[in-house]
């Protein structure tokens, strides 16, 4: 098992961040799966300036940290995280109707679904697919989130990136080298982070945009389970659907402790209130083994593991 944060480093963090630094905060309260242990340090970010200063200080102090947005697509160990969690709530959104094309600029902690609904009110199209996706704008770019035939790679115009060497850069969409549910920035995790993004939109009508948005939201409600989950557990293999592969393997509805492979959509793992992160992790491994044995296909998780998993 990994060790808790160095007490000298923790004391330095207390001096630098003072009462902004919370300690021993349960991450189960900040993840959509509602599981996970405690983090040594926890800082809530409200503005882009706060975010940039905090990240820069943590890099300078060589303090391990992780930027958390909505807490989807991440499974936090029951043993917690031995570092600092930055809860990114920097959420300013600005719509530019006069650009060619029209755009929306957003801080990385802005809610993706809220932003998509906001641009819909202006009659701007391009984000209808995002209306029911939990997550922040920064996290969506980082993992190339998508649904209903579109994703962030189709929408991103520019993003402002902060590197560990304290340099700011503006990246074009091409520089992200987007792939299915991944990006170049995801490969650089820990040494660069997203400050803000600008997305391209298309002028349409308010009624038309909202109608398509509500259609997508309704379809998601019909096909995906309610309750605490991380969203899709596995990436879809080429020309395959992870949910169908899981169902064919006999894993649909299988439970480990309080975690279940959803009987409504097998690529969702649901926490029935009393699941542990270890329950979910065991169910992930069991599902991978069953699917591989049944089809010869190795499912790749769409989620990230965070914290101490060395006991597995």
Image (spheres, rainbow, N blue to C red):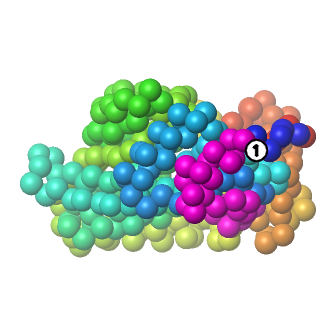
Image point 18% across, 61% down: which residue?
204
Q: How many marks?
A: 1
Looking at the picture, how far across and down is residue 75, in whole percent? 71, 51
Was residue 102 drawn as part of the magenta stretch in this picture?
no
- The crowd level at tag 1 (other Cα within 10 Å; few <14, some 14-19, many 20+) is few
Residue 219 versus residue 5: which sits nearer the camera?
5
Residue 111 shown left or right of residue 245 in the figure: left
Secondary structure, magenta segment, majority class: helix
Residue lying at the far front in this picture: please name it. 15
Residue lying at the far left in this picture: please name it. 98
- Please tell me whether residue 197 is drawn above or below residue 213 in the rendered image: above
Image point 80% across, 44% down: which residue?
4
Looking at the picture, how far across and down is residue 44, in whole percent? 53, 60
Was residue 31 drawn as part of the magenta stretch in this picture?
yes
Image point 63% across, 53% down: which residue?
14
The residue indicated by pointer 1 is 7
Q: Which of the 4 image quarters holds residue 21?
A: bottom right
Q: Quadrant of the N terminus?
A: top right
Image point 17% across, 52% down: which residue?
102
Magenta span? 7-35
Q: Is residue 11 visible?
A: yes
Residue 128 versus residue 168: which sits nearer the camera?
168
Name the secondary structure under disc 1: helix
Looking at the picture, how far across and down is residue 58, in whole percent? 55, 40
Residue 305 versus residue 222: which sits nearer the camera?
305
Q: Is residue 303 visible?
A: no
């Amino acid at each position: 098992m990994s060790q808790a944060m160095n007490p000298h480093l923790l004391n330095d963090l207390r001096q630098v961040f003072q009462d902004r630094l919370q300690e021993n905060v349960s991450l189960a309260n900040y993840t959509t799966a509602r599981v996970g242990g405690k983090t040594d340090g926890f800082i809530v970010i409200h503005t882009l300036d706060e975010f940039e200063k905090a990240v820069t200080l943590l890099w300078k102090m060589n303090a391990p940290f992780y930027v958390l947005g909505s807490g989807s697509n991440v499974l936090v160990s029951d043993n917690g995280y031995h570092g600092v969690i930055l809860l990114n709530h920097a959420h300013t959104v600005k719509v530019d109707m006069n650009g060619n094309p029209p755009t929306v600029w957003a801080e990385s902690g802005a809610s993706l679904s809220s932003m998509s609904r906001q641009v819909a009110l202006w009659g701007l199209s391009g984000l209808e697919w995002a209306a029911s996706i939990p997550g922040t704008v920064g996290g969506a770019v980082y993992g190339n989130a998508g649904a209903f035939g579109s994703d962030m790679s189709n929408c991103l115009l520019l993003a402002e990136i902060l590197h560990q060497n304290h340099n700011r850069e503006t990246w074009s969409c091409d520089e992200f080298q987007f792939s299915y549910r991944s990006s170049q920035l995801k490969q650089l995790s820990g040494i660069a982070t997203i400050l803000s993004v600008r997305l391209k939109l298309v002028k349409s009508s308010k009624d038309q945009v909202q109608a398509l948005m509500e259609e997508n939201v309704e379809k998601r409600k019909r096909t995906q389970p309610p309750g605490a989950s991380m969203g899709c557990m596995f990436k879809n293999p080429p020309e395959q659907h992870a949910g169908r592969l899981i169902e064919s393997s006999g894993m649909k509805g299988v439970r480990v402790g309080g975690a279940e492979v959803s009987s409504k959509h097998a690529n969702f793992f649901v926490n029935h209130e009393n699941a542990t992160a270890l329950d979910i992790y065991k169910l992930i491994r069991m599902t991978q083994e069953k699917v591989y044995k049944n089809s010869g296909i190795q499912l790749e998780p769409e989620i990230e593991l965070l914290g101490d998993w060395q006991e597995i």
